[in-house]
Image: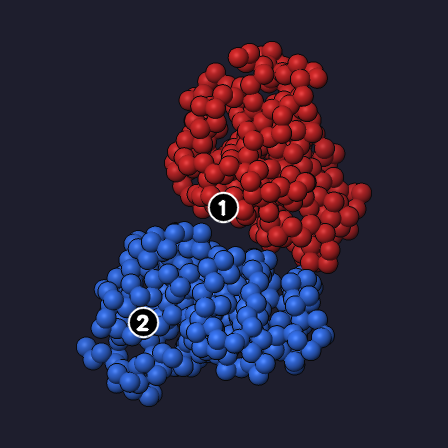
Chain colours: A red, B blue
Amino acid sequence: MNAASQAIGVFDSGVGGLTVLRALVTALPDESWIYLGDTARLPYGTKSATTVQRYALRAAEVLVERGIKALVVACNTASAAALPALRERFAHLPVIGVVEPGAAAAVAASRTGRIAVIATESTVAGGAYVRAIAALQPDAQVQSLACQVFVALAEEGWIEGEAVLAAAHRYLDGWFATDAAHPDVLLLGCTHFPVLAPVLSQVLGPRVSVVDASAAVAQTLCRALAERGLLAPSGHQGSAPLLLATDGVARFARVGATFLGHALAAEHVQLVDL
Amino acid sequence: MNAASQAIGVFDSGVGGLTVLRALVTALPDESWIYLGDTARLPYGTKSATTVQRYALRAAEVLVERGIKALVVACNTASAAALPALRERFAHLPVIGVVEPGAAAAVAASRTGRIAVIATESTVAGGAYVRAIAALQPDAQVQSLACQVFVALAEEGWIEGEAVLAAAHRYLDGWFATDAAHPDVLLLGCTHFPVLAPVLSQVLGPRVSVVDASAAVAQTLCRALAERGLLAPSGHQGSAPLLLATDGVARFARVGATFLGHALAAEHVQLVDL
């Protein structure tokens, strides 16, 4: 089998990474995809870095056994904790995380260097985005805020309406008050949040760019594949993504539909054991 | 040591059970309390019944080793999965869960037999409240709804304001439409929800009783202690509850303050290992 015609593996602890998959499929429509959500063992955010590395390596093995030409770690926790270990173990594959592309996109979008990051509690506590932005632009002023209610709203499929608007105002109004020194970029540092981007843009107005890392991840992946001659030939017509989950396929399908942006039946999701 | 002067153990997978502790302390001010939140291994709701039983037995052992005269399982998942196992292992202790007292309180409060239960996804899926209400009143019409956004709002300390009101309307308006057949009781089947009771009562108005199981749990405990001559003597002046958590004491203190109803510093919470 020609390596270029192999699928690309995408891995997350749950359904959130489906927003990344959606952006990848849109940007690279000729590719084929296998997505693995390790729903039996989520949340990763509360687990130790060693455990997250172990889980990520096992999930990656399962994808590699099925034949993939690249691996996207569509999970903030695993990107922060396991990328070096994954790159060492699977040195023959491009392995792409979400933190660095997101940080680079935020730095590129900011004119003032004042960047706000919203994420889960554990991502904020880990500080990966703050470090990644500082590595690119040491004088950037980065603030980050945990927005757990956004996670619940996104999983409930409440991506518009009064509850989301009120939550967005409650989290963000203090930060983006109308003085001159407010951040000019809001980086979505959680894979659940892209579905809320339209509401967040509406609340923040045109003074603030809402940056979704997933487009940047797609660009990074495209470049990595092109460098190695691994891009699927144009017009190859990728098949529908293969979706795997380690538990709760009915919930995966229900919540995943919001994140993928189209209906998804439980029978479209295969249960796998790691 | 006189058995009656021993503490009462209260156990939950996390901080939610602190709403139950709060009601217990209010109802039984002469008693002393040890609360254990198994925060390192939450959520219980997604785990198998066997695993939840194992965790609950271990948590109860830790409390029993410290000397308790009764055990309250302030956790819906553990109440549904582990009460028989706990009662068998600790046959010398009154062991009280939250499901039966909550179901009994709802049945007592309903004039029409139409009862609505709100809970977490896993509690709704497990069906424990529907079964417990049916056992008490076989012709009751019970509907249940998972309200995961309420969990996130309560943990964020957002117990009033626009976001909570909007979420309450979005979940409940369909159920409590102004026809004659709406439920007349809303049973709070998640230990996080009592902090939202004022908003829920405001949204539903006087036609609907919002039933918080924790007062019923306190009554059940009081009766069990009295039957065994284990009530602390009146005026004994119970000490401040001892709070134990298996992980994340800072978060426990921050979120727990909302649920206990008063400020709580991280140094008030002891880290324990199971």
Q: Is residue A128 visible?
A: no
**Residue identifier under label 2:** B95
Q: Which residue is mark 1?
A: A248
| Residue drawn where x is 45% and y is 32% of the image | A59
Q: Regarding mark 2 in the picture, which secondary structure is present there? A: strand
Instruction: Identify which residue, A28 or A176, lies in the foreground.
Output: A28
Residue at 44% across / 28% down in the picture?
A62
Residue B269 falls in image quadrant:
bottom left
Counting other residues with Cα less than 10 Å from the Cα at mark 2, is it few (<14), some (14-19), or many (20 or more)?
many
In the depicted structure, whether residue B237 falls above or below residue A80: below
| Category of crowding for the residue at label 1, using alpha-carbon neighbours closer than 10 angstroms: few (below 14), some (14–19), many (at least 20) | some
Image-quadrant location for residue B235: bottom left
Q: Chain of mark 2?
A: B
Mark 1 → mark 2, Cα distance in angstroms: 32 Å
Q: Position of residue A94 (x, y in %)?
A: 53, 20
**Quarter holding residue A50:** top left
Q: Position of residue A72 (x, y in %)?
A: 55, 28
Is B267 placed left or right of B184 in the picture?
left
Three-letter amino acid code at the position of disc 1 = Gly
The reply to whether discs 1 and 2 touch (Cβ–Cβ < 8 Å) is no
Amino acid marked by disc 2: Val
